[in-house]
Image (cartoon, rainbow, N blue to C red):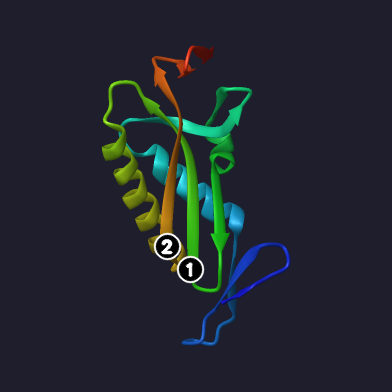
């Protein structure tokens, strides 16, 4: 595999000689975002903390709550999530790591070397809380 200028990953099929497969970084981000939100206790992805408030993202913006670094054969992932109030954060975070790693490796063939989970907020119902601030 080699990196292309537009951040796509090029996977060369040396076994069959049929050609190449290109996977955009955006695809890896979406896979990670969807895998993270499948975990029970995850309310959604977060775009990060802006002005002390975690901004929730809808399903259309799954890749916005994820950062990836993709090399020739490996990938590192940072996820930014909002967790459901009352869940045990370390357990949810560990499950996110497992789910994201498995999904990316199964779908792309890349080896995921790390999955970092950044909890950006806690949500109860449809409100997102960070300290005393809320976004509806």
Q: Residue at 52% x, 47% y: name it.
A: 30
Q: Residue at 39% x, 14% y: name it.
A: 125
Residue 27 lies in quadrant: bottom right
Q: Residue furthest right?
A: 5
Judge by depth and name the residue closer to the eye, 33 or 47.
47
22 on left or right of 131: right
Question: Local crowd at mark 2 within 10 Å, few (<14), some, or many (≥20)?
Answer: many
Q: Residue at 63% x, 23% y: name it.
A: 51
Task: For residue 136, say whether it is visible.
Answer: no
Q: Residue at 57% x, 35% y: name it.
A: 60
Picture mark count: 2
Q: Which residue is mark 1?
A: 74
In the figure, 63 relative to 84: above or below? below
Task: For residue 12, say whether it is visible.
Answer: yes
Where is residue 1? Give x, y as percent.
56, 77
User: Label 1 near label 2: C-beta < 8 Å?
Assistant: yes
Where is residue 11? Give x, y as percent.
55, 74
CA gap, disc 2 and disc 1? 6 Å
In the figure, 61 relative to 76: above or below? above
3 on left or right of 70: right
Judge by depth and name the residue closer to the eye, 27 or 133.
133
Q: Earlier in the sequence, mark 2 or mark 1?
A: 1
In the figure, 134 relative to 31: above or below? above
Label 1 SS:
strand
Label 2 SS:
strand
């Amino acid at each position: 595999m080699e990196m292309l200028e537009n951040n796509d990953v090029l996977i060369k099929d040396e076994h069959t000689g049929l050609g190449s497969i290109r996977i955009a970084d955006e695809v890896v981000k979406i896979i990670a975002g969807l895998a993270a939100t499948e975990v029970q206790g995850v309310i959604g992805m977060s775009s990060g903390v802006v002005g002390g408030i975690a901004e929730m993202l809808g399903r259309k913006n799954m890749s916005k709550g994820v950062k990836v670094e993709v090399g020739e054969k490996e990938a590192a992932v940072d996820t930014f999530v909002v967790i459901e109030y009352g869940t045990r954060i370390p357990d949810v975070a560990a499950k996110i790591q497992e789910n994201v790693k498995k999904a990316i490796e199964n779908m792309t063939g890349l080896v995921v070397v790390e999955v970092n989970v950044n909890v950006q907020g806690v949500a109860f119902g449809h409100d997102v809380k960070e300290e005393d601030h809320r976004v509806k």
